[in-house]
Image (cartoon, rainbow, N blue to C red):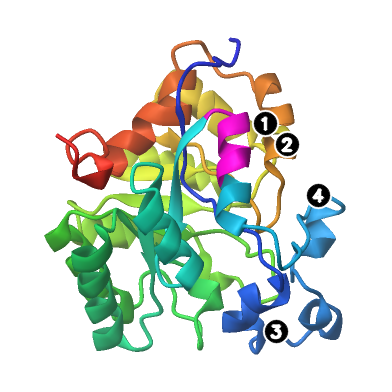
Amino acid sequence: MSMPTDVGIVDCMIGFPSTNPYENYAFFRDNIKDPASKATTFPVEYLFKHNVPGAIEAEVDPIATTLGQMDQYGIEVGLIGCQDPVGQQALAEHPTRFAASVHVDPNDVVGAVRSIREAAARYDVRAVGAFPAGCTPQVPIADAKWYPVYATCVELGLPIFMCAGIPGPRLPSMCQHVEMIDIVCYDFPELVFVTRHGCQPWTELMVKLMLKWPNLHYSTSAFAPKHYDPRIIDYANTRGADRVIYAGYFPMGLTLTRIMTDMPNVLFHDDVWPKFLRDNARRVLQLDTRPLGGGA
């Protein structure tokens, strides 16, 4: 039950530090009404205490910083956004270390589909990212506006990574109720659907749905390993070894030092660790069948 040190981890949620982290959350900050949350650099600071990475100085290279952290903790590949200049530079300069993800808001249905297709052609995108509670206005997981996005993911063979459960920012939550994933999986049996950010307080329901739907997965983003839900650990150790995927939260809300210091204390079985840290992500992101950087 010891965490292996030679796996070559795939981190399904990583990014780059910024000189102005406040701007990272501008896309949904106008939705927040709580004055304290609206004013903070990270609108979920109340949950993360003192573990939130801060701003970097202008002379610091954000890509080198993230790569240094990845190398320190054995992370071979990181899933990053492709819609900002730093992410685009990282993909161009380090094509075998980073896999691209494109984030969409389906309030512009045609624009969302177009952005997926364009990013897939330009950046060899491996995933689509979505935050229903952060859309403007919010779009529930099973809303019709998402359906062209889901269909495009199926057509292009891309997984969707979608936040589910109570969001950390002080926003309404029912748009991310886990029960809505049931109808999405029913309508799109070929869609590879990966949840982000814990699914709480509906984790038991999420486990039940993963038992039901073969293409439904859970990723551990935004949680320090100390706080991984015991029901998810139990599921991975019993029937769900192929469905639980490691995702971090650097630099959005957690340092990799905090994550990897906690990680060895997680009670995964020996055969689960490689699947959790590497194999499941490599399968979902098609890293073995379509190697990054165009390799054979």
Instruction: Judge by depth and name the residue closer to the eye, 125 or 94.
Output: 94
Helix, strand or loop at mark 2:
helix
Three-letter amino acid code at disc 1?
Met
Q: Which label is found at residue 260?
A: 1
Using residue 284 as the reference point, say whether residue 2 is left or right of it: right
Residue drawn at the location 70% of the way across and 70% of the way down: 21
Quadrant of res 227: top right
Mark 1 neighbour density, 10 Å: few (under 14) some (14–19) many (20 or more): some
Mark 4 to mark 1: distance in Å? 13 Å
- At label 4, the amino acid type is Asn
Residue carrying label 4: 51
Q: Is residue 249 visible?
A: no
Type of amino acid under label 2: Thr
The boundaries of the magenta stretch are: 67-74
Residue at the (12%, 62%) spot, across then down: 155
Quadrant in the rendering for residue 102: bottom left
Judging by the rendered image, the residue that carries numbered circle 3 is 32
Numbered label attached to residue 257: 2
**Image position of 127 (left or right of 276):** left
Would you place residue 245 above or below residue 114 in this image? above
Instruction: Give percent across and percent down for residue 260.
Output: 67, 31
* For marks 2 and 3 on the same chain, the one whose residue lies earlier in the sequence: 3
Q: Is residue 72 visible?
A: yes
Q: Residue at position x 39%, y 53% from top?
A: 93
